[in-house]
Amino acid sequence: MNKNTAPGLIDINNMFFWTLLYRVVAVVLVIVTLPIRDTLPLWMIESFHRIAYPLLIYNIALLVFHKRTSAFLLRHPGALFADLFIAIAIIQIGGGWRSSYFGYTFSTIILFTIFKGKRWTYISTVALSVAALIKDPSGDLPSMKVFFVSNLDMRMGAALIYVTAGLILGYFSTLLQRLEILSRSKIEETRKLTALEEKNRLALELHDGAKQMVNAMLFKTNPLMKKIKTSRDEIADELRWLWRGMNYLHSDLNQVMDTLKIQDNTDKAAFNILAIIKEEVRIAEVITGFSWNIRSDSHNIFFPLKYKLPLRRFLSESLMNAWKHSGETIGNIYLKFMDNPVSLVVSDEGKGFVFKDIERSETTGLNSLKHRAKELNGDLSIETAPDKGCKVVLTLPLRIGSKKLP
């Protein structure tokens, strides 16, 4: 049996349809029968509620005892009470509560608990319904007489009241159930979206860190393979570079993994931006041989610690792009402080390029710079033209000294 399907009448995935259909049919029969009750044969009236009532109780038993719906029933008892009110309305038409119906209900529930999910449950339900048609029930159940009256007109009024109460409760329980499932679907949709965003973030982290280092190592390994039969000193220098590169790669991966761990990213801790710039420049110079001139209007500019990795990634991408595309061997970094905000300028006097062409192609490098600027709550601008070099400007909403981003 499909795990999403309850035994018997109810498919969990279509519970709205089946419960609503059952209630509507029951109510329609009640309303149609009330005005013409006196003209109908007694056997027809009794047969109607003898069939309807055991099946309705069986429906309720499925809701009560089926493990996948019991949790829902506890949260929304209106569904059960709606069916009970409709059951009482049906019995009102029949003229009172018969003791045999109590027996039918009890037997159905017992058989359901014993043969839950098996074909005997279906057989027992059919047998009980057939018995309700054949057997002539007798005797009222005294304890239930409080729900019923003997006068026919009053019974009709009571039936209408019970039907109305059942419809109201059924409507609100169905509405609550729909809202609950809608909420679950929204949560699932949010979870999938969050997972997708996390995958994109991981891909970007690997591109800006580990992939950059691996590319540089491959770039340096190719000439090493050509020199392997020439100078031992040159080979030793290249091996030392590869050793430093692997250490950097190991350190970078550790930092990425640390940022992915659950931690308290408060703004209490801060880092010195100039110190991070010098550290990234030192690493880039070792890897590429590209030199950088650093200027700063202040040595006391801080930023919350949780933004340290995005700033390192921004610097790494900018420095690597200058090395790969400028055709020069030297660049400039200027940490500019003019009251507020602070500007970080990375520039070279190399070949430059047509910015619109790069922007249209949506290169990974440009997308990475835009993403990092957004993470830093900063504004990014790029000034470049063929043979005019390239200037990357990141404007940060910072303050000097111990004051940090609001």
Image (spheres, rainbow, N blue to C red):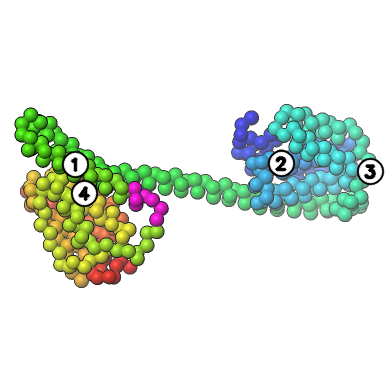
**Is residue 259 part of the magenta span, yes or no?**
yes
Which one is earlier in the sequence, the residue at label 1 or at label 2? 2
Q: Residue at x 79, y 54 (%)?
A: 161
- Circle 2 sits in a helix, a strand or a loop, which is it? helix
Q: Which residue is mark 2?
A: 65
Q: Residue at x 34, y 52 (%)?
A: 259
Q: Residue at x 23, y 70 (%)?
A: 400
Q: CA gap, disc 2 to disc 4? A: 61 Å
The answer to whether any part of residue 305 appears in the image is yes
Q: Which residue is mark 3?
A: 139
**Is residue 288 part of the magenta span, yes or no?**
no
Relative to 138, 347 lies left or right: left
Magenta residues, start to end: 257-263
Q: Which numbered tag is attached to residue 243? A: 1
Q: CA gap, disc 1 to disc 4? A: 22 Å
Structural crowding at the residue carrying mark 2, measured as other residues with C-alpha within 10 Å and reported as few (<14), some (14–19) or many (≥20) = some
Q: Is residue 361 above or below residue 224?
A: below
- Circle 1 sits in a helix, a strand or a loop, which is it? helix
Q: Which residue is mark 4?
A: 317
The answer to whether the residues at label 3 and label 2 have Cβ atoms under 8 Å apart is no
Which one is earlier in the sequence, the residue at label 3 or at label 1? 3
Which label lies toward us, 1 or 4? 1
